[in-house]
Amino acid sequence: MDVIETLIPDVKLIRMRRHLDERGFLSETYSARSLAAAGIATVFVQDNHSLSAAAGTVRGLHFQIPPHAQAKLVRVVRGAVLDVAVDLRVGSPTFGRHVAATLSAAEWNMLFIPEGFAHGFCTLQPDTEVVYKASRHYEPTHDRGIAWDDPALGIDWPVDRSRAIVSAKDRALPPFAALLPWFAMAAPGARQAETVADHAR
């Protein structure tokens, strides 16, 4: 696999290789060893798989707060999405900025999103399936989010707000300006600081 830095260096775009023959292909879609060699030594504990029936479906922007903050490794096995990661780390030079990348089954790529980022995506094709690994289990009491369409984030979504298919839960998410300082930028070589030990709703 080839690991490519994005505009936010901690977020990585990864292109997987496919070995083709007359039968089809074989692809190594996850290798802890290869990722560790590229500086991604995250241990993943949970896999999630979503199907979105219609293009223009938006899921996000979601994150979990410490001590259950999640890193994610996101890929598309059918269809395509615009995948977005927003930096929530107070003190980061890219705080409030985002990375947006097109992930697709055709491109056979994926995005690594570390702790301290909100994540969401918009489907570009019908019947799109997204699978992702998470570094911590889902914890409902630590589940949070910010509004996907907040103008302050400057995300160029591929669907108009009035036409997007969004859950009632995601439509009620607060703006970025209401974000509490859940995350702090880690010192070089250190694990990210957990500024809030444990907050439940």
Image: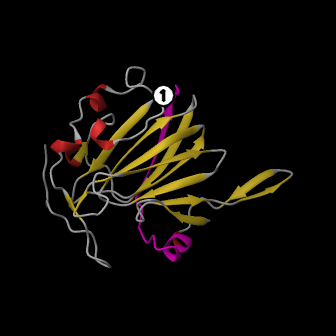
Q: Can you give x and y, in whole percent of width and height, for residue 117 in the image? A: 32, 54
Q: Amino acid at mark 1?
A: Gly
Return the residue found at the far right: 22
Q: Can you give x and y, in whole percent of width and height, for residue 33 in the image? A: 54, 74
Give the residues in magenta. Answer: 33-56
Q: Nearer the viewer, residue 200 or 102?
A: 102
Q: Nearer the viewer, residue 62 or 154?
A: 154
Residue under the point 75% across and 53% down: 25
Query: Residue 59: which quarter of the image?
Result: top left
Q: Which residue is mark 1?
A: 56
- Structure colour scheme: secondary structure
Q: Can you give x and y, in whole percent of width and height, for residue 66 in the image? A: 21, 58
Residue under the point 47% across and 50% down: 132
Q: From the image, which quarter does the C terminus lie in?
A: top left
Neighbours of disc 1 within 10 Å: few (<14), some (14-19), many (20+):
many
Residue under the point 26% across and 75% down: 187
Query: Residue 10: which quarter of the image?
Result: bottom left
Query: How many discs mark residues in the rendered view?
Result: 1
Residue under the point 55% across and 46% down: 103
Please, what secondary structure does the residue beneath circle 1 have?
A: loop
Residue 55 part of the magenta segment: yes
Q: From the image, which quarter does the N terminus lie in?
A: bottom right
Instruction: Work out whether 57 lies above or below 196.
Output: above
Q: Can you give x and y, in whole percent of width and height, for residue 15 in the image? A: 61, 59
